[in-house]
Image (spheres, helix red, strand yellow):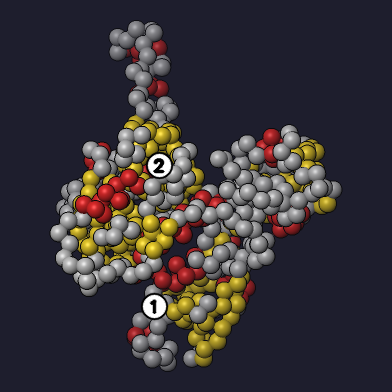
Amino acid sequence: MNTSYSRHPQCGRALRASVVLLAAAALGWTAAAAIANDKTAEKKVVVQVDSKPLDREGRGGMRVSFSSTVKRVAPAVVQVSVTAEVPESSPGNLSSFLQDPRFRRYFGLPENFKMPRQEPQREAGSGVIVSSDGYILTNNHVVQNAAEIEVILDDGREMKATVVGTDSESDLAVIKVEAEDLLALTFADSDHIEVGDTVLAVGNAFGLGQTVTSGMISALGRATMGLAYEDFIQTDAAINPGNSGGALVDTEGRLVGINTAILSRSGGFQGIGFAIPSNLARSVMQQLATHGKVFRGYLGVTMDPLTPALSEQLGLERDQQGVIIGEVVEDSPAAEAGLKPYDIITRINGREFASIRELRFAVADIRPGEKAEITIIRDEEEMTVDATLASRDGEVALNGGPGATEDEGTLNGVAVADLTPQARRQFGIQSRIDGALVVQVERNSAAADAGLREGDVILEINQVRVRSAEDAVALTEESTASMKTLLRVYNMRRVVRYMIVDESGER
């Protein structure tokens, strides 16, 4: 039998978005502007955090029931019912095949025969209310194909939910319902949990309704599913289909993880389940709520573990901690900082680590555009270098994002990128055209209303020439008195147009 990892197949305002910059150094795109000087006050999801360690000494006596904990937790764990998108008919499938009258006659079907309408696919998962105003954490794989999402509260209320943002690299998503005064779970500090701690898993197992199981933390720091960023809590508390996105809580009812997957030889629970730690979930959630996506620092190196044998060969102590650089990506932040193969990274911003996974998280935690002090060993000598990190996916947030309530510049809801050769080929842009490529325009934004579209090239902003994404960002960081921006744009029909983006709110 083969062992398989299962993210259960059954599981499953528009607010102002930031002007962002697409660099994509890892994809060969030129790194450009960053956010080192970004002073935007981001609106955050207001959550409760209780960082004190769990009482493991049993000072309160032996627990024989967790009913009081469950009563506190249950109202904050919801059922997430997803109506998935129905795939359209494609050439070669049966529906398309029977559109041909010859085949209908061959099979004795009437001329007016129609294929039975495919019913929408419905799936069920779980979610955790994390703020009283309706933000809910769940798994990305619960909602990734959703056409419609309905949340069912513990008291039976049903509410429509919208997707705030998703992150496939950590398998997390944030959805929101329009409600107030909801009971939200308090976050525990997952860095303080230990193997052997008792935990409860709460969720919508098998679509039956809310179910609670108990167990302990079996292991920490698991990386099992091939995600780019995974640091799973392993537990033997039963996690079953429908539990995805549910809560893993400690005995005080604090959220320590988001239930995500199981390791199984049969498809059912076999004593090994995985949950995303609450600290990671909280960090991702805040970015999704603020920007609609996650921005992670990117250094641009490949790495290998520093084994005792390798340390000895390089003239170091066998127990030297760190990772060794295998390759430096051309034009990456690492290359610009002067990092080289055989350099051993031991600390980032004073933070020590002993594995590639820990270093990856340390880099990802640094906001793109910020400088990182990297301590390395080169030729048996310790030294430090400064690297200004890019974004792993090439994007950098500049002027806040969804949830921003203050005036934060102009062209909100627009994302731009440099015009690289790849971008020119993709959008058919002639070599004589210079400017900033529009790669995203938020629906219902003032820019969208003015007619700005993805694939357009911004040539001028308020009659000032734009030659790069960095130029566009700099020209939109400060608001105009009228909150109106004059654009000169080259569009995909190869026509130069003028448009006025009115963000005064009077349009």
Callout 1: helix, strand or loop? loop
In terms of depth relative to the viewer, which is nearer, 495 or 171?
171
Tell me which corner region of the image, top left, top right, bottom left or bottom right, holds residue 506. top right
The x and y percentages for residue 10 are 29, 40
Residue 46 visible in the current orientation: yes
Residue 233 in the image: above or below residue 292: below
Q: From the viewer's perspective, is the residue at label 1 or at label 2 nearer?
A: 2
Q: Secondary structure at mark 2?
A: helix
Which of the 4 image quadrants contains residue 249? bottom left
Comparing 391 with 245, the one in front is 245
Q: Residue at x 78, y 38 (%)?
A: 499
The image quadrant that residue 63 belongs to is bottom left
Q: Which residue is mark 2?
A: 143
Q: Is residue 476 left or right of residue 73?
A: right
Cα–Cα gap, marks 1 and 2 = 35 Å
Q: Residues within 10 Å of mark 1 (few under 14, many from 20)?
A: some
x, y percent for residue 72 = 30, 51
Q: Earlier in the sequence, mark 1 or mark 2?
A: 2
Looking at the figure, which quarter contains the C terminus?
Answer: top right
Label 2 CA crowd tier, 10 Å (few <14, some 14–19, many 20+): many
| Residue 365 appears left or right of 139 | right
- Left or right placement of residue 16 versus residue 241 in this view: right
Image x and y of residue 294, in percent: 51, 55
Residue at position x 37%, y 33% in the image: 158
Residue at x-position 35% and y-position 17%: 115
Q: Is residue 191 above or below residue 69?
A: below
Any mark on residue 354, and which? 1
x%, y% of residue 166? 46, 48
Which amino acid type is shown beneath numbered disc 2? Val
